[in-house]
Image: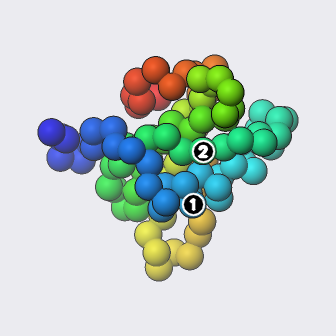
Amino acid sequence: MSVPGGYTESKPATPEIQKIVDQVKSQLEEKENVTYEFFKAVEFRRQVVAGTNYLIKVSVSNSTDECVHLRVFESLPHENKGPSLTAYQTGKTKHDPLTYF
């Protein structure tokens, strides 16, 4: 059960979420000065505001449990802006819960 105005429960990533992750990948790579060969959305949580906030768990290795957690803001469609990486956490694993940070 989600709280009004709060984040939804974690759900498996969808093709729509993968598209958002693909759009912010370069923003993370620039901030971390790293190139991710593997970048696959695993699960997500959503919060609707004046736009949408997402918490997204992304697997960065197909051979280990290594993940990053992304906080992404997507503005309303009429604003014509792509998704923006607002915060991130590295050093996560597939077993770490996706919580607000």
Name above or below for residue 53 compared with residue 68: below
Instruction: Identify which residue is drawn at 46% across, 20% down.
Output: 95
* Helix, strand or loop status at disc 2: strand
Q: Position of residue 64 (x, y in %)?
A: 65, 23
Can residue 70 be seen? no
Instruction: Identify which residue is drawn at 51% across, 75% down.
Output: 79
Instruction: Identify which residue is drawn at 66% across, 43% down.
Output: 39
Q: Which residue is mark 2?
A: 40
Distance (Cα) linking label 2 and label 1: 10 Å
* Helix, strand or loop status at disc 1: helix
Dot in front, 2 or 1: 2
Can residue 100 be seen? yes
Say how many tags the image has.
2
The residue under label 1 is which amino acid type?
Answer: Lys
Quadrant holding the N terminus: top left
Q: Residues within 10 Å of mark 2 (few under 14, many from 20)?
A: some
Q: Residues within 10 Å of mark 1 (few under 14, many from 20)?
A: few
Q: Which residue is mark 1?
A: 19
Q: Is residue 52 left or right of residue 20?
A: left
Instruction: Identify which residue is drawn at 78% across, 33% down.
Output: 32
Q: Position of residue 15 (x, y in %)?
A: 49, 60
Seen from this angle, which residue lies furthest front? 63
Q: Position of residue 72 (x, y in %)?
A: 52, 48
